[in-house]
Image (spheres, helix red, strand yellow):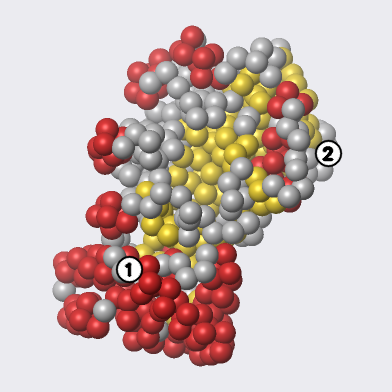
């Protein structure tokens, strides 16, 4: 069934028709969605989450009601494990400026936060998530290698000032001592010291930081580190200060990896992983939850105590967070007579709730036939046009069109041009490792 999907407007979204999320929402006539040139559009939601459930275009009924009334659409085993809803939430994000420094709670903490504060934590579910770049993307993701943080504590005086001389020295001695069993505690102590500063102290230190970024150029932050040059860090500080003047996030960026993704590249974030998206259009898939613990780069509710307590304080180069997609084995690509460039690529995180396949058909008439799976799928077209066939039913597909396909159905995608791109999120329990608890 074709879906009408809602689009949220948040301050960090791209403006007007520059937003892919808005353009995709407007592609469905049933939405009656008019794009305003001066309004930010941030997220297209595809799924059954009660905050913004998708609707069947033909009947106007919500997808949540439909799958509740027919659990066979999900598969009884999936409905039993995850409830009578899609186990994943599929999104398109269009990011114009930084969205909050945040983490998503694990299942146990989510239940506790929801029971204590359901207004700010509306779900009792965890929220591991995967990001796939549709355009060039940059963001902050996971704590960087600790030697890099030591470098910044030595070379960024305003950062050292906020962490505090004693805490900074303690961190350096611990890392130099080489006892890895103490590293995470040292990182937590230093990060918490930064985050617990008074607003006035952060704003004062930020003025010094921005001044240094504007004047020092390539020598800023001691010339940077191997993954990020001093000039790149200086430009990042100046840019983010324009978006959120005097924010603690200007200093958090020295703790986190700065990541850039090109089109098709992806990363996976476990529950309790700290991150902040900065710019770009992305496909995002996550467990069905809207829980966010924020602590910077946001006008919304911040919960610094919860954030600093909940994080895993794992640290690694960004290369370890990036995913390694592979060819999807359960699809027949009818491409020999058309184009060898057609492909179906699988992004398969180590959790049960979801996987995503990106399909690119590079010639008119090229087909991709997906084997039936024991779980539901949601498909969005992000480029080009064609048709989708399930059984005896075929429907036209254009950029921004979204479809739900129930469990047990073979899906055929066929291109009407030379560049037809779709993303398919799906859940199939068989053979999936569950590392997302």
Q: Residues within 10 Å of mark 1 (few under 14, many from 20)?
A: few
Quadrant housing residue 110: top left
Q: Residue furthest front?
A: 200
Quadrant housing residue 121: top left
Q: Quadrant of the C terminus?
A: top left
Q: Looking at this view, is 73 or 44 the one in front?
A: 44
Considering the numbered disc 1 on the image, is that residue within a helix, a strand or a loop? loop
Q: Residue at x 38, y 36 (%)?
A: 119
Q: Looking at this view, is 177 or 60 the one in front?
A: 60
Label 2 close to label 1 by CB (< 8 Å): no
Residue for badge 2: 417
The numbered disc on residue 282 is none
Q: Residue at x 37, y 68 (%)?
A: 199
Compare marks 2 and 1 and give the one earlier in the sequence: 1
Q: Give the side of residue 13 with respect to residue 193, left or right.
A: right
Q: Quadrant of the N terminus?
A: top right
Residue for badge 1: 198
Query: Up-down: is 235 above or below 309?
Result: below
Q: Residue at x 47, y 13 (%)?
A: 68
Q: Give the side of residue 345 with respect to residue 19, left or right.
A: left
Residue 90 coordinates in the image, percent (x, y): 54, 36
Between marks 2 and 1 in the image, the one whose residue lies nearer the viewer? 1
Examine the rendering and report whether any part of residue 202 can be seen. Answer: yes
Residue 281 coordinates in the image, percent (x, y): 63, 51
Q: Residue furthest top?
A: 69
Residue 301 coordinates in the image, percent (x, y): 41, 49
Query: Up-down: is 154 above or below 233?
Result: below
């Amino acid at each position: 069934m074709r879906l009408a999907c809602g689009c949220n407007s948040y301050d960090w979204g791209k403006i007007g028709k520059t937003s892919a999320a808005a353009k995709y929402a407007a592609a469905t006539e049933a939405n009656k969605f008019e794009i305003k040139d001066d309004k930010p559009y941030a997220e297209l939601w595809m799924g059954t989450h009660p905050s913004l459930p998708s609707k069947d275009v033909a009947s106007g009924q919500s997808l949540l009601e439909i799958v509740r009334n027919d659990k066979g659409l999900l598969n009884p085993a999936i409905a039993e494990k995850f409830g009578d809803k899609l186990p994943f939430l599929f999104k398109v994000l269009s990011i114009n400026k930084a969205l909050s420094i945040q983490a998503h709670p694990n299942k146990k903490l989510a239940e506790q936060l929801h029971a204590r504060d359901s207004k700010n934590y509306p779900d009792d579910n965890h929220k591991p998530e995967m990001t796939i770049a549709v355009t060039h993307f940059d963001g902050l993701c996971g704590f960087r290698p600790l030697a890099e943080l030591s470098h910044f504590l030595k070379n960024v005086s305003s950062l050292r000032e906020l962490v505090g001389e004693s805490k900074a020295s303690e961190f350096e001695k611990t890392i130099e001592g080489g006892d890895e069993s103490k590293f995470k505690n040292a990182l937590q102590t230093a990060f918490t010291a930064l985050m617990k500063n008074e607003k006035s102290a952060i704003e004062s230190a930020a003025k010094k930081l921005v001044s240094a970024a504007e004047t020092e150029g390539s020598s800023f932050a001691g010339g940077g580190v191997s993954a990020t040059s001093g000039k790149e860090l200086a430009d990042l500080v100046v840019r983010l200060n324009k978006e959120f003047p005097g924010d603690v996030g200007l200093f958090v960026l020295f703790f986190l990896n700065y990541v850039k993704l090109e089109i098709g590249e992806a990363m996976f974030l476990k529950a309790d992983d700290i991150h902040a998206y900065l710019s770009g259009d992305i496909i995002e898939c996550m467990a069905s939850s809207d829980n966010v613990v924020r602590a910077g780069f946001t006008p919304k509710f911040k919960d610094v105590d919860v954030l600093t307590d909940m994080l895993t304080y794992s640290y690694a180069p960004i290369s370890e967070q990036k995913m390694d997609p592979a060819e999807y084995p359960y699809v027949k690509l009818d491409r020999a007579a058309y184009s060898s460039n057609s492909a179906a690529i699988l992004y398969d995180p180590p959790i049960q709730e979801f996987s995503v396949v990106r399909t690119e058909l590079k010639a008119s008439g090229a087909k991709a036939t997906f084997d039936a799976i024991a779980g539901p799928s949601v498909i969005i077209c992000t480029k080009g046009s064609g048709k989708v066939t399930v059984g005896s039913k075929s429907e036209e597909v254009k950029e921004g069109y979204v479809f739900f396909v129930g469990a047990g159905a073979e899906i055929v995608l066929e291109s009407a041009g030379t560049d037809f791109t779709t993303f398919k999120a799906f859940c199939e329990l068989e053979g999936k490792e569950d590392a997302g608890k």
